């Protein structure tokens, strides 16, 4: 899960758990702001050449075929 996806998930969960209209309005605004964020550029593993999100490439099990 990318950082952006994780942020959206946490905001959505918070929204589903609050009944306060002011908090709901702020969470809706935060979710709309998340949608406007630029996507995370893909990176390439310098060893195997696999492309993906930086946080996934950092932890992938690199195999050179």
Image (tube, rainbow, N blue to C red):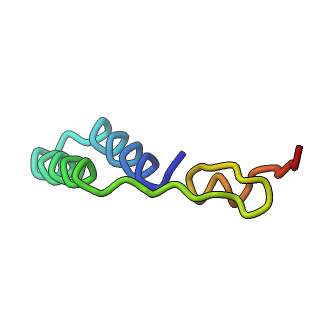
Q: Can you say which quadrant of the picture contains the C terminus?
A: top right
Q: Position of residue 49 (x, y in %)?
A: 71, 53
Residue shown at the point (37%, 53%) measured from the top left: 39
Please identify the quarter of the rendering in which residue 37 is found.
bottom left
Is residue 29 or residue 42 the one in the foreground? 42
- Residue closest to the eye, 63 or 3: 63
Tell me which residue sits at (25%, 47%) in the image.
35
Q: Quadrant of the N terminus?
A: top right
Residue projecting furthest to the top:
16
Q: Residue at 15%, 51% (x, y): give it.
A: 29
Counting from the top left corner in percent of width and height, residue 41 is at 46, 57
Vertical side of 58 occupied by 50: above or below: above
Query: Is 21 displayed left or right of 61 in the figure?
Result: left
Residue 16 x, y percent position in the rendering: 30, 35
Closer to us: 25 or 57 = 57
**Residue 38 in the image: x percent, y percent?**
31, 57
Q: Name the residue: 69% across, 60% down.
A: 58
């Amino acid at each position: 899960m990318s950082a952006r996806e994780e942020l959206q998930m946490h905001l959505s969960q918070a929204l589903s758990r609050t009944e306060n209209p002011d908090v709901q309005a702020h969470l809706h605004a935060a979710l709309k702001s998340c949608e406007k964020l630029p996507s995370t550029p893909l990176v390439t593993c310098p060893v195997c050449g696999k492309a993906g999100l930086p946080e996934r490439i950092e932890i992938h099990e690199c195999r050179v075929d």
